[in-house]
Structure formats: structure tokens, C-alpha cells
Amino acid sequence: MTAWWHKDPLHPLIKTLGKDKVFTTAENLALYGIDATTFSGDPLAVVLAESTEDIQAAIDFARENELSITPRGAGSGLSGGSVPISGGIVLSCERMKIIESVDSKTKTAIVQPGVVTEKFQREVARYKLFYPPDPSSYKISTIGGNVAENAGGLRCFKYGVTSHYVLGIEYVNSEGEVEQTGILSSKLSNPDITSLLIGSEGTLGVFSRIALRLIQIPEKTVTLTALFLKSEVGLESIDEIINLGLTPSVMEYIDRKSLTAAANHIGVSFPDQAGVMLLIEVDGKKDEVIDTLHQIEAKLKKNALVVEVAEDSEDRDRLWNLRRAISPSLVRLATGKIQEDIAVPRGKLAEMSVHLSEISLKRGVEIAVYGHAGDGNLHVVILYSVYNQGEIKTAKLAAQDVYEAAISLGGTITGEHGVGCAKRDYLHLQLSDLNIQLAYQIKKNIDPHELFNPGKIFPSKGSWKSSSSHTSHSNL
Ligand code: LAC
Ligand code: ZN
């Protein structure tokens, strides 16, 4: 006779994986129901996979029981990608953090998906190698999550985004089978679907191993800051530097609101008149770095209030702490924030900045702006009160204004954070119905059971048209 507790629908999963890998308590479900946005979901169980076989077991169980799988890395994403809005099972790869190999001869590495980005960078640096992609959350984000979101970051201007460093992926498909692409595949794999998997936001399968390209570590790195009275002048300086034919690794723009929040957060002060700050980094061969540095300094000094150079690692760390404190410090300014990552062609940044001031005035909302100006990628942060229905509505309208302004300038509604459920219902502003339908058909062909991350990227399961019932998990 089967005891009553064996009738727990999750019992077979717990029996296969062991109770150390399956969590169902309310606290765990709540913890894994969120990411770095304010979306939330209500999963039935959380699986902490430790191997490819564990991933397979969770996928088999989900498929057989018609439950969804929400793949998860560190949960540091900013578009709701790892939020289980469809309930089901959260499949976290955070325990799969083995760096399997680093090969200095071929400049490649093979890692499990749960390896933390910064830890990986530190490890390859021991071989004088460099893995440049560095999303702002790199101290906690995982390589698997970075690949799933095709994460950008601070050094994209010179080095590109995550996709430029992925050479192959091993993943488990919706049938529970292990597939390999790129250099991880022993077969000739044309067409190579590696690029389809990168940035697929957990909608096509669960990554179990990733092969990465590495480059030589730069000989020298210096960091510069310049403070300007006005934002237009700061933005123009970016173009001027690029027009000199220079390629700094980082070109960050930080408006006064963001700078004030971050400076207060970490306890530093800056000159009162500063309206905007540029944070620039130059790396490469020693002589080239010095030469580039001098040219940039000379250019900036023409219009900036102050230009300062940080050469030693302690000073540089201090500046980076300030930069990386922006996002968490802005959270403290209001009970709610919409964090956008629109991008426009770089030459249109000043125009976008004017649009943003107009939107702020027109809607009566507070907006902070910072981001990867070298890439034309701006983080537009709309602050509001979660306790005020009027403010919530206005913040959403302002966000839509921001998307429309970016698109009108030839830009995009998401430069680096992904679509997830945050931008899902706005995708039609950017892509034609035909385009969205085509992408959805590809997803359905690869994942016919719609097991993986339903409700992400595409408006809703079985229907790619915008559906208001799915907007209830707002980014607010
Ligand atoms: C940053 C994140 C928000 O650049 O992308 O801080
Ligand atoms: Zn960013």
C-alpha cells in the first residue's frame, strides 16, 4: 500500500534527486521566486542541480508532469528572466561551479554554468588571460546567466558582449537529451545553433557546460574621471574622444542624480557644481595606454571642471565601487523603480538626453540616467512610489515614452538586460508581428512542450499577441 505522503506529486522528483537538491519550503520558494527586478513568481519546487544528469532528471520530471522549468543562475537579472512566473520548477545551476579547464595555448576555457563571472575572471588572470564581459553584477552573476541573457557590461565598447566569447554550449533539451554545439560538439555542426542559444533567456534549454574564448590580459589599465557642468558637454566629449580614433575599454556616463545616490551610498563627496561624470578606462600595451591617456586627458580638460586619473588598483577600485553602487543606491531613493536599458546610436545620445528631460517634465516623474555611453546604452531609472496608484501608472507611461523615443532615434528597447517579462509586452514596438511570430515558431520547434520559461520574451503561452492578463507581473 502506498503511504499517503508518497502521494505528494513531487515525491518522485525528491526520490530521484535526493532531498538535498529539491526544496519546497515556503522560504525557499519565496527566495527563488524573485530576481533583481520587482517581478515575482510562485514555484512549486526549486531544484539545485549539481550535474548534467540532475538537469536531465528535473526536465524529465517537468515534462512528464506538465510543469514548466525556469532556469536560473544567480538571480541577478534585470528583465525577470529567472522569475518563475509560470510556477513549476525553478532549475538553478548555482551549484554547478566547476571551471573544468583553462587552456592557455588555445586561449579557451570550459566551465559549468554556475561559475561566478568575477571568480572566472580571477582564475583566468592566473594564466595571464582575460575574459572581458563584465556585467555590473559580475561579483554575483554566473556565466550561465550571462550567456542566457547575452549580458553586456562596462567593457563592451572595446571588447563586445558575452556572445563574442562563447565558442560552444552543452545544453539539455526538452526531451531531456544532452546536446552540444560549437567546439563542444564532436560532429560538424553546421548550421551552428550556438548563437541561437546565446541570449535565448532560458526559453530553449538548460545549459550544462559552456566553452569560452579568452584573450591576452592587458598589460596596463588606467581609469579616468571627468566632471562636467552640463550633460550635453559630457556626451559630446565621448564622441570627440572616439573621433580621435581612440578606443577606451570603458566609457560610462553618470548623471548628477545617479552620482549623488552612489556617492552617498559609499560615503564619498564630489564638487558641488558637477552635473555629470564620465568614467573612462584605457587598457592595452603600456606605451599605447600612456599615449591614449594623454590624448583623452587633453581633450577632456578643454570642457571639464575636473579631470583625474587613477592608476593604482586601490584608487581604481574606489571608482569602480562608486560606479557599481549606482543601481543598488538608486533603489533607496524610492519604493519603486523601473530600470531601463534602452540604447540609441551613439551620435544620438545628446538627443536622447533631451527626450528624457522632456519625458520627466511631461509626466512629472523623477528620472536618473547613467550607463554605457560608449555603446549608446543608457540606464534610465524611473523612480516612483509603489503605494501610489497614480505614480505607478505614470511611471509605466513614462517607460513607454522612453521606449518610443529610443526607437524613434533608431535605437532599441533593450540594450543589454534582455526581454524577459519586463519588455515582453513592448516587443511589438520594436519588431514586426511577423518577426515575433517567426522567433516564436523557432522556440516552439525547439521546445514543443513549451517547458522552458513560458511567458518570457513572447507575450504568452500559445499566443504571442500582447495579453493584459500577463502584464499583472509588472516591472513595478
Ligand atoms: C549596470 C546594470 C544595471 O550597468 O546593467 O549598472
Ligand atoms: Zn549596464
Image (cartoon, rainbow, N blue to C red):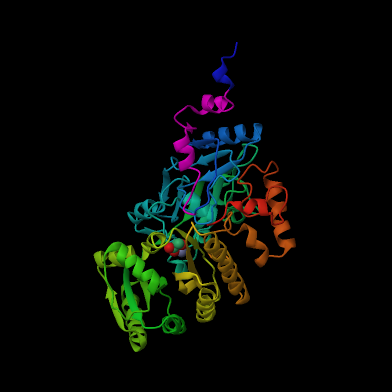
Quadrant assignment, res 465: bottom right
Residue 35 falls inside the magenta stretch: yes
Q: Visible in this render: residue 411?
A: no
In x, y percent, where is residue 323?
36, 66
Q: Visible in this render: residue 268?
A: yes
Of 200 and 209, the residue lying toward us: 200
In x, y percent, where is residue 127?
34, 55
In x, y percent, where is residue 399?
56, 66
On screen, residue 258 versus residue 462, left or right, reads left
Magenta segment range? 8-37
Image height of 398 relative to 348, above or below = above
Q: Quadrant of ligand 1?
A: bottom left
Quadrant assignment, res 56: top right
On screen, residue 63 versus residue 141, left or right, reads right
Residue 226 falls inside the magenta stretch: no
In the picture, the quarter occupied by the N terminus is top right
Going by the picture, which residue comes out furthest to the bottom? 302
Rendered residue at 54%/68% (across/down)? 342
In x, y percent, where is residue 450?
67, 44
Image height of 112 relative to 371, above or below = above
Rendered residue at 53%/26% (across/down)? 16
Image height of 203 relative to 14, above or below = below
Rendered residue at 71%/54% (across/down)? 464
Of 399 and 345, the residue lying toward us: 399
Going by the picture, which residue comes out furthest to the right? 434
On screen, residue 111 versus residue 6, left or right, reads left
Total marks shown come to: 0
